[in-house]
Image (cartoon, helix red, strand yellow):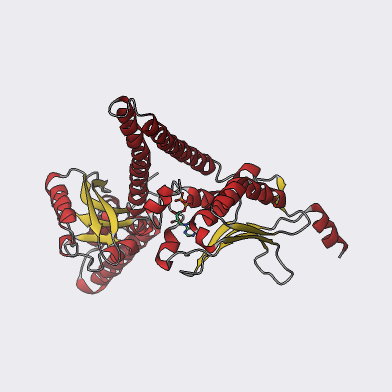
Amino acid sequence: MAMTSSNSGFAPWPDRLRRSAIILIATALGLAASVVYGGLTLPQAGLIFLVIGGAALVPWHLHQAVPNSEDMIGARPAETPVVQALVGGMPDAAVLLDRAGRVLHFNTAASQLAPALRKNELALFALRSPEIIAALREAIATRQPQRAGYVDRVPIDRWMELIVTPLSLPTAFGGSEYCILMTFHDQTALRRVEEMRADFVANASHELRTPLAALSGFIDTLQGPARDDAKARDRFLGIMHAQATRMARLIDDLLSLSRVELSAHVRPEKMVDVVPLIRQVVDGLEPLASERQVAIELQLPSSPVLIAGDTEELLRVFENLIENGLKYGASGGRVVVSLTEPGADDATGEIRVAVRDFGPGIPPEHLPRLTERFYRVDVGDSRAQGGTGLGLSLVKHILNRHRGRLMIESVAGQGATFTACFPATKTASDETVAAKE
Ligand code: ADP
């Protein structure tokens, strides 16, 4: 039964019996002394004992009905250790306030967000942002949930969302205690993804709109002023072909990117020899190399070099890196493509395919951003070369999928080296050798 259980909120039974027994013994001793020394008759003393004994039983019932002072504190549920632990354990910044907006509990994340927060003080004094203050005031006045977004500028810009939730906590006596829970959610990562998505759509649309505008402009010209000009027609059709090719390439790159992203978590397992793949790409780029008067030097091992990879994706990686070397580093007249396997003292254990050119190189401030979508050192130059600004981004995603990485090194004026690094995979024969050792 609830009344007899030790956590019912009342004094336990042994306690109550002890108190009553003490009263009865004290009364009996007092009455005995009065009979002996005070002239009290025995029936009178018996009557008094019965009255006091009966009265001693009454507190048993009072114990059950009236909680002691500790129980009274427990009757304010918002101030119990359980609620304090709940607020403290919340992963986001959280502050619990009483109905007037005074701080009852807050967690570590909240104290980092608002270092001026103090227990039993008004939260409004500790909060800086006008949006938070307005939402809190509104919640206190209306007892309705409120939301507010604001930017926290210290120590770095963070986009935060505050949710103010009025709560009604039931008390032990059937009433309720009204309080307010404030939780702060960091929306920065979400916001960045949202900005990236919007930028990506804007960039892709812009890149497609430029050749499209050129195409429709030339169509208009061919239908109008240049209708009967055979020479102009040939020249314009050549430009239109180049623009249409650029659009097709852009769409190809966009589709490849989304395909690689979709399979990013699935690592390719098939073993592929990369040596013939590099030769195949170099053969395919020979016409571009001779057009740009660049000599491609190959430094490849004579034996196969196996990695766990996707053939088509590896071809895209080598094609992008070597083509960039030919396009942007043409002035150096030479591109060196080398493949190195990890040596015995190489702690990284990587197979590396490096493409080095001797062109103008890349200023250091651009290096960290080169693999961003649509990022180009010189947009005009890239467009003139038929570039889309997606090549290195695609390379990075493919290498990530292969659990590899892209290294970019460049000294302005001395060319650039792009290195695709792949984790070396143990072959069956390696394992046999290791087992023998
Ligand atoms: P794009 O389609 O423009 O070539 P990429 O993603 O392949 O796009 O390359 C991004 C930018 O990096 C290029 O526009 C160019 O400015 C720069 N870049 C890439 N490779 C080289 C290189 N070998 N030398 C100098 N700049 C390079």
Residue 151 location, x and y as percent?
24, 57
Residue 212 location, x and y as percent?
35, 35
Q: Is residue 428 left or right of residue 384?
A: right
Residue 291 in the image: above or below residue 334: above
Residue 323 location, x and y as percent?
55, 51
Residue 92 location, x and y as percent?
35, 55
Residue situated in front as seen by the camera: 92 or 42: 92
Q: Is residue 131 visible?
A: yes
Q: Is residue 54 visible?
A: no
Residue drawn at (65%, 58%) of the image? 423
Outermost residue, left direction? 141
The C terminus - image quarter: bottom right
Residue situated in front as seen by the camera: 423 or 227: 227
The N terminus - image quarter: top left
Outermost residue, bottom direction? 37
Residue drawn at (63%, 48%) of the image? 281
Q: Is residue 389 left or right of residue 103?
A: right
Residue situated in front as seen by the camera: 130 or 377: 377
